[in-house]
Image: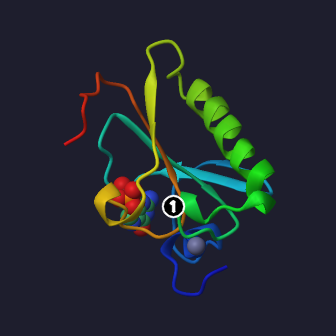
Amino acid sequence: MATDCLFCKIIAGEIPSTEVYSDDDVYAFRDINPAAPTHLLVIPKKHLTDVKSATADDEALMGKLLLRANEIAAAQGLADEGFRYIINTGSNGGQTVFHLHLHILGGRQLGWPPG
Ligand code: 5GP
Ligand code: ZN
């Protein structure tokens, strides 16, 4: 746990969130400011600042994050109509919370390219 990290505090239950999924390694919850009818954040319980901070030690964790996201998206009823995963990284990527998170967006037609 990183002491000054918002999402570490959410994992620890120090800041409330709407849980959608939890296991030993992965936590998923609803985004507080949804950009689509379904907007979830899937995060590793281990603090990683961003996706480029993952190392070979995190190979299984990265795979698990994506596979759990697939299961969560399906459980949310997004599989048939489709959805989008987004991992914003760094300043140009629009990252605002520096604990790796995968956005799941679904429930409406999404535009491309992103602004
Ligand atoms: P980023 O821009 O870093 O990719 O995404 C951060 C996301 O975290 C944003 O979509 C924002 O709405 C969400 N967020 C920020 N603070 C909180 C919070 O306290 N609770 C929840 N559930 N989501 C948050
Ligand atoms: Zn953290």
Q: Is residue 12 left or right of residue 81?
A: right
Quadrant position of residue 44: bottom right
Coordinates of residue 11 in the picture (x, y in percent): 63, 67
Q: Is mark 1 within 8 Å of ligand 1?
A: yes
Q: Is residue 106 left or right of residue 60?
A: left
**Residue at x 53%, y 51% (from the top left corner):** 29
Viewer-closest of 58 and 107: 58
Q: Is residue 97 above or below residue 31?
A: below
Q: Is residue 47 above or below residue 44?
A: below
Task: Tell me the amino acid under the disc marked 1.
Answer: Ser
Mark 1, secondary structure of its residue: loop
> Which residue, given by chain and number where applicable, does mark 1 sit on?
17
Instruction: For residue 32, say whether it is visible.
Output: no
Viewport quadrant of the N terminus: bottom right
Quadrant in which ligand 1 is drawn: bottom left
Viewer-closest of 84 and 93: 93
**Residue at x 52%, y 86% (from the top left corner):** 4
Q: Is residue 100 above or below residue 79?
A: below
Viewport quadrant of the C terminus: top left
Coordinates of residue 38 in the picture (x, y in percent): 41, 35
Q: Is residue 56 left or right of residue 80?
A: right
**Residue at x 80%, y 57% (from the top left corner):** 24
